[in-house]
Image (spheres, helix red, strand yellow):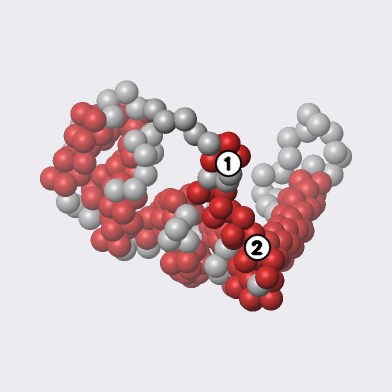
Amino acid sequence: MSELKKSEIKGPDAFQVRIFSTLNWLMLNKKQMGLVLLPVVLVAAGGFVWQAVTNKMKDTRLKALAKIEDQFGAETEQAYKKANPAGQPGAQPDAKVQPDHGASLLKYVEFAKENPGNAEGWLAGLRATNISLDKEQLAQGDLEAALKLVEAVIAKSTASPFHQTAGRLMAMAILEDLKRFDDALKQGATLIGTVNDDLKPRILLGKARIELAKNAKDDAKATLNVIIEKHGTSDEAAKARALMATI
């Protein structure tokens, strides 16, 4: 190996030369570089601003939804006091006295309509659906109104597995009560294809019940067998065996 000269040892290598050249060019061309980097800076700053605005809007929605929740709780509290005017912990409240959630229901519905594209609006829609169904005697109009509410949630929350599952479970039950069995089974089929194994036995049992209601006994038997064979340790498996014995 030939001996290196001092000038070669002390001199800058190729990488250092490129770095020095680049820094020198930047110093001489500050204006041009500013124009090049400005869009990048604006995009980055815009991202931070958008994130801050989005978070603030979410907080505003959550606070508004919490106020409706507080009103719902106050309505429940008022009904409890009316059912147990003595206020004694051991007293049996009057079961005939039911909370009037008409005011909070309207606010949930309004909030859901104003926020159709976010989780807070979907939650409000589900709460409104649940309140609409919380009656001792449900008329067809009540069921249809509840179905309309939950269908709006299902239509808008396609990217949210939680809201899709909750909404479709409600829709399946409502459609069964409306005797729209084929539509109920469609909701069940979608759920079975998307939920985890823990929830499948419950949906399959509902599916079998609907199939029996429409007198499709062979289909019901096949569904019950799936529960027994694939989910034999679940609570629904015992119910499936008992239901199978009645067919």
- Helix, strand or loop at label 2? It is helix
Quadrant location of the N terminus in the rendered image: top left
User: For residue 179, what is the image quadrant?
Assistant: bottom left
Category of crowding for the residue at label 1, using alpha-carbon neighbours closer than 10 angstroms: few (below 14), some (14–19), many (at least 20): few
- In this view of the protein, can residue 113 be seen by the observer? yes
Residue with the most extreme left position? 218
Amino acid beneath label 2: Asn
1 vs 2, front mark: 1
Residue shown at 79% from the left, 42% from the top = 84
Question: In the visual, does 166 lie left or right of 99?
Answer: left
Going from N to C along the chain, the mark reached first, 1 or 2, is 1
Q: Is residue 86 left or right of residue 151?
A: right
Q: Residue 64 placed where, x, y %? A: 74, 62
Amino acid type indicated by mark 1? Ser
Label 2 near label 1: C-beta < 8 Å?
no
Number of callouts in the render?
2
Q: Which mark is residue 41?
A: none
Q: Secondary structure at mark 1?
A: helix
Q: Looking at the image, which is closer to me, 240 or 155?
A: 155
What separation in Å lies between label 1 and label 2 (alpha carbons)?
Answer: 23 Å
Q: Residue at x 28, y 58 (%)?
A: 186
Identify the residue under disc 2: 24
Q: Residue at x 47, y 30 (%)?
A: 3
**Residue drawn at (23%, 48%), measured in percent from left and top?**
212
Label for residue 7?
1
Position of residue 237 measured from the top left corner of the image (x, y, whole percent)? 30, 29
Q: Nearer the viewer, residue 243 or 85?
A: 243
Q: Position of residue 33 (x, y in %)?
A: 64, 71
Q: Is residue 214 left or right of residue 84?
A: left
In depth, the one of 44 and 11 nearer the eye is: 11
Image spot of residue 12 (x, y percent): 58, 46
Q: Quadrant of the C terminus?
A: top left
